[in-house]
Amino acid sequence: MNKEVILTGDRPTGKLHLGHYTGSLKNRVELQNTDKYEMFIMIADQQALTDNARNPEKIRNNLLEVLLDYLSVGIDPSKSNIFIQSQIPELNELTMHYLNLVTVSRLERNPTIKYEIKQRNFQASIPAGFLIYPVSQAADITAFKASIVPVGEDQEPMIEQTRELVRSFNSIYGEILIEPKGIYPKGNAARMPGIDGKSKMSKSLGNAIYLSDDPDTINSKVMNMYTDPNHIRIEDPGNIKNNTVFTYLDIFCKDRIYLEELKENYTRGGLGDIKVKKYLNEVLQSQLEPIRNRRKEYEKDRDYLYEILKEGSNVARNVATYTLKEVRDAIGVNYFNM
């Protein structure tokens, strides 16, 4: 039985946080442990360089940090192929071929690109590599014939652009590429707010709880979390809507009966923020302690970590090489049958 192929990944711009865990990492572990899928997990260093080209050390330094986070949450390199994007040069040629099938105006209309350009204050000075990264992403997905791509909600326009490119290529050159579908997180996990309550959890915004944070750091971050600004005194009725502490408890608390009691008491009045935050701290510490401990074990053998990346990249390159040959043949530029 042919397995469906999944492609997913992360930019190595920093350690991964709770938003990554609920939004994608937890789901990846569940998917890899079934017999239905072949999974490729890409550490997207080239994509990260599109807005970090003048600081490549940041990308190199975080390569192993991202891998350690993968391993610590339970991603198994014997079940999932973990590879480095830059080590698969075939992806670059695929990107070049696909660029001929998309216009600059279409790239500029991509909502994700428009948002991220604004977030990074690029304005008129948009790096060309950044503008075309939806096309690079299409190359990543199609190189492995991935039919399933688990991503956050904000990446839906990127998946749609890949689908457009696949349809264009196949209509011109024949049915070579697979049109992927995105899988998106549901509920609160879809967009976990940062500890400031003002935006989604983000490395760049400095409002994240990281999977590798030590107990004291987690406790400090929880105690400074945004709650209900009108809940000044313990006896005041509190609002749980848009209350970051309760949003986190909805995601991570396993004792649903006790959580409902907390909500009722908080809403009625008579329950202070400190008590609720202390409970959230206990919940998060319980969730993150085994992850943190596994990370410490993997940190002891850096040679093993590089071997995982090397082997995964070799597997990925073999697959991408085959797809590139199909693309060259279809276009008619495989002049020497390479």
Image: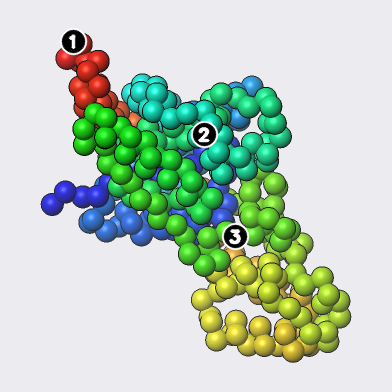
* Residue 186 drawn above or below residue 266: above
Q: Using the rendered view, name the quadrant where residue 232 is placed.
A: bottom right
Residue at mark 1:
336
Instruction: Give neighbour class at mark 2: few <14, some 14-19, many 20+ (Cα, 10 Å).
Output: some
Number of the label disc, if any, that sits on residue 192: 3
Indicate the amino acid at tag 1.
Phe
Residue 107's disc number? 2
Q: Is residue 142 above or below residue 224?
A: above
The foreground one among 48 and 329 is: 329
Q: Secondary structure at mark 2?
A: helix
Location of residue 288 by image quarter: bottom right
Question: Which residue: 25% across, 26% down?
Answer: 327
Closest to the observer: 137 or 100? 100
**In-image side of 231 versus 168 (left or right):** right
Kind of residue at disc 3: Met
Q: Please identify, in this view, whether the residue under mark 2 or under mark 1 is nearer the observer.
A: 2
Percent x, y of residue 219: 70, 62
Does 156 appear above or below 198? above
